[in-house]
Amino acid sequence: CQVIENSGYGADKFTMVRNNDGTGSLKIVQPLDYEDTLQSNGFRFRIQSLLDCIVQGKSHFRLTAVRNLLKRETNKEHKREREMHLTLLWLSCYFDCDICRVDHPLFPYLCDALLVVNAPLAHAHYTPRRCPQVNDKGEDNDNDKYHVAYSWVVVKLRDINDNKPQFERPNIEVSVYENAEVGKSLETFKATDPDQGGKSKVKYAIDRTSDRKRQFSINQEGTVSIQRNLDREETPRHQVKVLAIDDGVPPKTATATLTVIVQDINDNAPTFLKDYRPVLPEHVPPRKVVEILATDDDDRSKSNGPPFTFRMDPNADDIIRASFKVEHDQKGANGDGMAVVSSLRSFDREQQKEYLIPIVIKDSGNPAMSGTSTLTVVIGDVNDNKMQSGAKDIFVYNYM
């Protein structure tokens, strides 16, 4: 039993081997791929077997049904009969017997067999278009026990879901301002699946492990939109994983990445660089109390930060405005600006222990943002009071 070499397209992808029990096995020797344009159109080649070799599907193939056809030949010269068993393969659903023919007129026979096969690399649907031809030379040699059968075999592949969807652009980067409105469309992904002749349907989803706050959404056209407000100061860069899922069984998934760069806007007011709590000793003359620096969460490379300007809040209490002054030093902090807070009088801790000074800080963004931070000045104690006589009543309980 053998596949006839160069008998047609696909002859190199299959082979026939003889089994120990005298049967033959049709096996795949090269990968099959429905997505290959040539292979998707099928294979057509010839197989040959000697009539004492019953061909049936084994190994990679499963034989569903085979019918042996009993033939009788009458050799008039030797006045004897001999029986031949010819096994015909019916690979798939139909075997067109209208074109069957036998070279020997004494060999009428029927076509009736069925073989359904499953290939390991692709599901193969085999449909022969021509019945086997039986060549009986009718030799008078009794040792001539072999007769040759030929069959044209057409192999058609059935597609299986063995390919992931393919993105046209698997990596996309987009920039968006952090104040972009919810619902704004960012980018559209397009994926196709080569299975089912390119007719496989693809649906889209977002891998929520890459978007735990669910700030983005995707529709079934592949368009990614903003679902919740963005904040550059919280997350300046998002790596959103977009999934394309085909409709195969089981489904296969491909992944693309949308990189979202969140652009800064000046939406944060400047604040104190740290929590300042200077101590001013009591009973000292007016003096400098502290130098104040500021910081801003916005992107200073976009001019949404320094230089800062400082001033005392005009709504500060009268006692604060009478006790302290706030001066702006534009050259301080390497040009970022700073505030110099000084006292205007001396203080007595026994009268008031601390003072709260509201200071307004303004950045250089467009539009500029300003905020008010509060400086706490602690009045330090000195030993400036004499000891005085005192008395205290103590109650003692006796539980005898």
Image (spheres, rainbow, N blue to C red):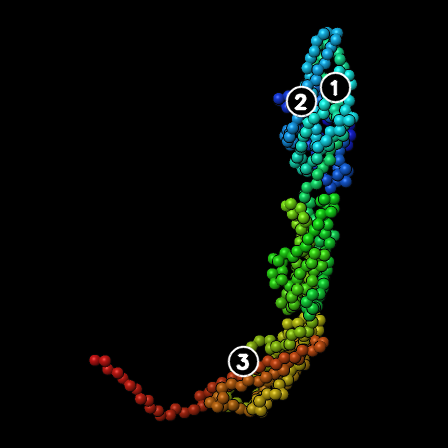
Amino acid type, label 3:
Arg
Identify the element where label 3 is drawn: loop
Query: Residue 235 placed where, x, y %?
Result: 64, 65
Identify the element where label 2 is drawn: strand
Q: Nearer the viewer, mark 2 or mark 3?
A: 2
Q: For residue 372, what is the image quadrant?
A: bottom right
Amino acid type, label 2:
Asn
Q: Which residue is mark 1?
A: 108
Q: Residues within 10 Å of mark 2 (few under 14, many from 20)?
A: some
**Quadrant containing the C terminus in the rendered view:** bottom left
Q: For residue 150, what is the image quadrant?
A: top right
Tell me which residue sits at (70%, 60%) in the image.
224
Tell me which residue sits at (72%, 25%) in the image.
111
Observer-nearest residue: 148 or 373?
A: 148
Tell me which residue sits at (72%, 7%) in the image.
79
Q: Which residue is mark 2?
A: 68
